[in-house]
Image (cartoon, grey):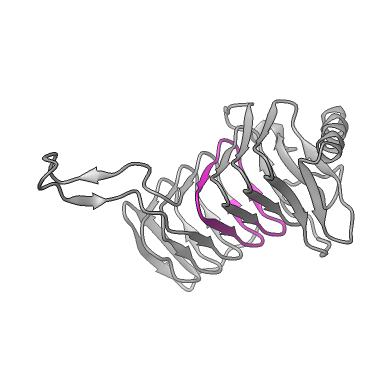
Amino acid sequence: MIRNYLGYIRGLVAIAKGKVEYETRKYRPFIIGYKTKLNLEPKAKIILTSDSVVEKYTSANNKFFPNSNTIGTYAYFYFLDPPCNDKTKIELASQAKLILSNNGCILSGAYITAGKNAEIFIGDNTYIAHDVNINCKDKRIIGKNCLIEYQSFIMDYDGHTIYENDNEDIKNYLTDGKINRITISNNVWIGFRSVILKGVTIGDGAMVAAHSVVTHDVPKNVLVAGNSARVIRKNIFWER
C-alpha cells in the first residue's frame, strides 16, 4: 500500500518534469516503481491516452489506483511472483514515444527501448509481466486485454548484419539488420519466455505457448507452439 502511494508521488514528479503527458480528457494516476529509471532523450515522451474507463478488474493491475498506468511495480499477489530483476528501465531515443492506454500494467524488471522516432503503443487493460524485454526501432502495437508473460522478448529488427561469406568482394547479405514492425492484436496471450521476432502480426484471441519462437504471422483464435511456432489448435478462446 505504501509503495503504491510512493509510486504515485514519483509519477506526479515525472509529469511535472515533462517526461509524461496526457492526451486524454480523463485524468488517471501514473504509478512508478521505486527502482524504475526513465531515460528519455530530447522530445521523447511517455503519453497517457484513451478516454475509456475499465470497469472490470480481472487482472493484476493496480487495485489501489483503478484505471491507473503502472511501470516497474510488483503484482499484488506477491506469493506468485517469480524471482525477477527489481530494476526497470524505459529508454526512449530522440522523439520516440511510449503510449500507454487505460489500466495498463508493466511489472518490475522490464526493459523497454525505442529508437529515434519509434513508437510503442500498449492498449487498454494490457498486462506485461516481470522481466519482459521490448526493443523497438519502428512502430510496435500491443492491443487491448493482452497478457505478455514473464521473461518474454519482443524485437522488431535483427540487430546485426549477417553475411554468407566474409570476403568483401563476394560477400552475400543474409540479413542487413532490416527493421519490420510487429503487431500484437487484442486479447492475445503470450506465454512465458516466448520470443516474438520482426515482421510478425498476431491475430485477435491467439495464444502463444511458453518458450515459443514466433517468426511468422499467427491467425486469430489459434494456439501456436514450438520453434518456429506452428498452429497446434484452432478455434480456441481464453479468458483472464
Q: Residue at x 89, y 53 (%)?
A: 27
Task: Give percent across and percent down for residue 99.
Answer: 69, 53
Q: Residue furthest bottom?
A: 235
Q: Quadrant of the C terminus?
A: bottom right
Tell which of 60 and 140 is nearer to you: 140
Residue 178 lies within the magenta run: no
Q: Is residue 68 left or right of residue 97?
A: right
Task: Give percent across and percent down for residue 227.
Answer: 32, 51
The residues colored magenta run 122-147
Tell which of 13 and 233 is nearer to you: 13
Q: Is residue 230 left or right of residue 187?
A: left
Task: Give percent across and percent down for residue 221.
Answer: 50, 70
Task: Give percent across and percent down for residue 230.
Answer: 34, 62
Q: Residue at x 54, y 57 (%)?
A: 139
Tell which of 143 and 92 is nearer to you: 92
Q: Is residue 146 left or right of residue 4?
A: left
Q: Quadrant of the N terminus?
A: top right
